[in-house]
Image (cartoon, helix red, strand yellow):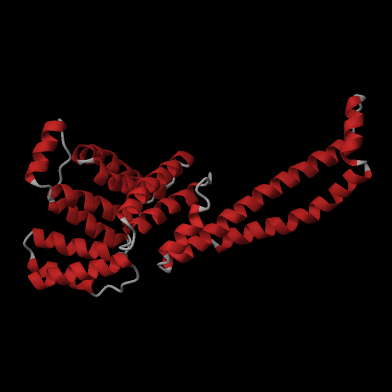
Amino acid sequence: MAAVVAVLVRSLRLRPARLGPLLRGWRELGGSEVLRKSLSRGVALSAGSFVLCEALKLVSGSAVVRASFKVAEVIEQADYLYGSGETEKLYRLLVQHKNSEDAELLWRLARASRDLAQLSNTSAEEKRQLTYDSLEYAKKALEKNESNSAAHKWYAICLSDVGDYEGIKVKIGNAFVIKEHFQRAIELNPKDATSIHLIGVWCYSFAELPWYQRKIAAVLFAAPPTSTYEEALRYFHKAEEADPNFYSKNLLFLGKTYLKLNNKKMALLWLSKAKDYPAHTEEDKQVQKEALELLNSI
């Protein structure tokens, strides 16, 4: 990030120095009035036209650089706020740019909207609106850049969240699309531990699907999504290999999955790690609470 910003700053510093002589030359020729009169007479201003064109190119290029610099600056602020757990401030910063054409800004806005929806002090009505908004932002991010790994990841996450409001048929129907986007995210960024973890959650969810939902799925779909706890466990371990101790929830799911597989020794190990994980966010606190409850139940 620092390197990118430095390049942009250098570009901004160089352009005005180059632009000054060209603009002065343009003014010496009488500016746009000279150009208008000359064009009306059909006279080609070889030197003046060149100066004008070069000046306009530099002005246009400078505007693009300034826009890029602004985006880089907003992203840097957003990442700082995200790392600090400032969910509401982060959302207020990014929602100002909801009409942006930049995928990096848009997927961050999708994430921020979802995170705000997850806060305990967010009302049910606000939660629903933010959930649908987050999906729209993620969808727009994908439209702007299909090769953006994070855009695929957050589109899948937000699509899953919307399924909670759309009913079991839609939720199961979306499951295939959700997994495809997680897989695409990993293809684009093989070291993305979060996307690997989320495929594990996908597998875990369908492994523990209640029998009545399995029957509904079997009726609605010729080949409904299925998985096993063993498959989920492989993804959770793969996520830890990609980035050890990166996420409290991955530790929790490792413990929960081992419990499902009746391996209490390993369940105790991972649940203890989840309980002791530093709580930087509200989600971390919820993980600690659930891990402690499970440990007390063993």
Q: Residue 224: x and y, percent?
A: 16, 36
Q: Is residue 258 left or right of residue 142?
A: left
Give left or right: position of 195 versus 203. Answer: right
Residue 68 location (% of width, % of height): 60, 52
Q: Nearer the viewer, residue 126 or 65?
A: 126
Res. 263 image quadrant: bottom left
Classify 213 as above or below 9: above
The one of 100 and 254 positioned closer to us in this rendering: 100
Q: Residue at x 39, y 48 (%)?
A: 134
Does residue 147 appear in this view? no
The residue at 41%/43% (across/down) is: 136
40 or 127, which is in the foreground?
A: 127
- Residue 204 rendering spot, x and y as whole percentages: 17, 52
From the image, which quarter does the C terminus lie in? bottom left
Q: Is residue 221 above or below residue 137?
A: above
In the rendered image, residue 205, in percent from the top left (x then y), is placed at 18, 50
Disc count in the image?
0
Whether residue 109 is visible to the viewer of this picture, yes or no, is: yes
Relative placement, left or right, of 153 versus 12 is left
Above or below, 4 against 213 in this view is: below
Q: Is residue 104 above or below residue 169?
A: below
Residue at 41% across / 63% down in the picture?
87
